[in-house]
């Protein structure tokens, strides 16, 4: 099922990228969009994990550098009968974490320095179990591919926007796009890409919470961690990265209020906590 969802997401975002190219550049844009889609699909499969880790300045660590963190990851992977992922630390005060990699054999988990300082060992274990749940469910590939292609679509729309401003909107029926179509592409393509990312991210977070709770054996610790991280997200900003990658994190680090809540990449934290508490009552 996950492979089918991955294929559907790739196909949808690829089609959107090609459509955006055609809307913004006519026949020439269609060819460029198709070529760009092929490059981005291949590149995101092999290199998107490295790209996102570099984006956040993540540094790989070993057991000697962070023995407690490393031992938590090792214990969880042994309990889940999973390969040991690479472990990274991000120099950010905001407590948060994400997992990435195209499959469990090429996975990585990254946590911020703030997470290690502000959470207890049990809470950190719950967070890492959640991220390993993403790895075990093979969500990491689909999440990084979505981030890469979504960012590419937004970038093309931004380039086209400036092109319309300075190019005066002139076009040729054979080579260029109609100004109205270009304007539609500028507005619709990034929103559509974001909605696709949101749709896949929200459902996978609930599944990763459940998987993480079972792996750690402590749903309430994960619930406590989510509550803390959500609280800090409103007060401690993330200085690196981009909202295009917000869905990778356990809690959106670029939280906004008001209208921004309508476009949240994550389900409501209160609902996630309620489900974890219900798991405890049911004996999960």
Image: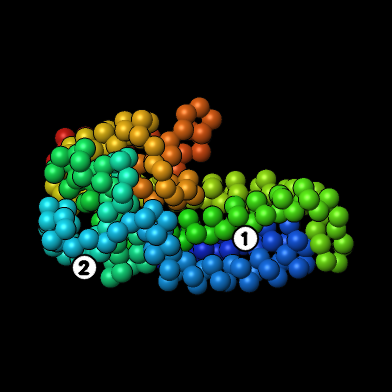
- Which label sits on residue 83? 2
Q: Residue at x 31, y 51 (%)?
A: 90
Q: Position of residue 76 (x, y in %)?
A: 16, 57
Q: Tell me if residue 36 comes above or below residue 238 in the rendering.
A: below
Q: Is residue 136 left or right of residue 164?
A: left
Going 55% across and 64% down the picture, which residue do you hit? 11
Q: Which residue lies under the disc numbered 1? A: 17
Q: Does label 2 or label 1 sit earlier along the sequence?
A: 1
Report the front residue among 78 and 175. 175
Q: How many marks?
A: 2
Q: Residues within 10 Å of mark 2 (few under 14, many from 20)?
A: some
Q: Position of residue 59 (x, y in %)?
A: 29, 59
| Rendered residue at 26%/33% (across/down) | 228
Q: Is residue 108 visible?
A: yes
- In front of the other: 78 or 1: 78
Q: CA distance from mark 2 to mark 1?
A: 34 Å
Instruction: Classify 16 as above or below 284.
Output: below
Element marked by disc 1: helix
Locate residue 284: give its quadrant. top left
Q: Residue at x 67, y 54 (%)?
A: 159
Residue 130: which numbered mark, if any?
none
């Amino acid at each position: 099922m996950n492979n089918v969802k991955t294929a559907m997401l790739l196909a949808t975002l690829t089609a959107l990228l090609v459509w955006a190219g055609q809307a913004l550049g006519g026949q020439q844009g269609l060819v460029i969009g198709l070529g760009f889609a092929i490059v981005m699909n291949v590149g995101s499969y092999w290199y998107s994990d490295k790209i996102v880790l570099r984006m956040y300045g993540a540094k790989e660590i070993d057991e000697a550098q962070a023995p407690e963190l490393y031992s938590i990851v090792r214990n969880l992977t042994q309990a889940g009968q999973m390969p040991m992922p690479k472990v990274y630390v991000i120099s950010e005060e905001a407590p948060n974490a994400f997992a990435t990699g195209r499959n469990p054999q090429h996975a990585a988990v990254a946590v911020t320095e703030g997470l290690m300082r502000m959470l207890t060992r049990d809470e950190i274990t719950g967070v890492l179990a959640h991220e390993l749940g993403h790895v075990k469910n093979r969500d990491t590939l689909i999440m990084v591919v979505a981030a890469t292609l979504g960012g590419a679509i937004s970038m093309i729309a931004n380039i086209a926007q400036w092109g319309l401003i300075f190019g005066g909107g002139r076009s040729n029926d054979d080579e260029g796009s109609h100004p109205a179509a270009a304007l539609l592409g500028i507005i619709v393509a990034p929103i559509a890409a974001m909605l696709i990312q949101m749709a896949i991210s929200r459902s996978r977070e609930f599944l990763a919470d459940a998987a993480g709770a079972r792996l750690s054996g402590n749903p309430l610790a994960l619930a406590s961690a989510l509550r803390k991280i959500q609280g800090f997200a409103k007060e401690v900003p993330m200085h690196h990265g981009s909202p295009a990658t917000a869905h990778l994190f356990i809690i959106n680090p670029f939280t906004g209020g008001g209208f921004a809540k309508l476009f949240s990449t994550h389900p409501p934290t209160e609902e996630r906590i309620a489900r974890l508490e219900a798991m405890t009552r049911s004996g999960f």
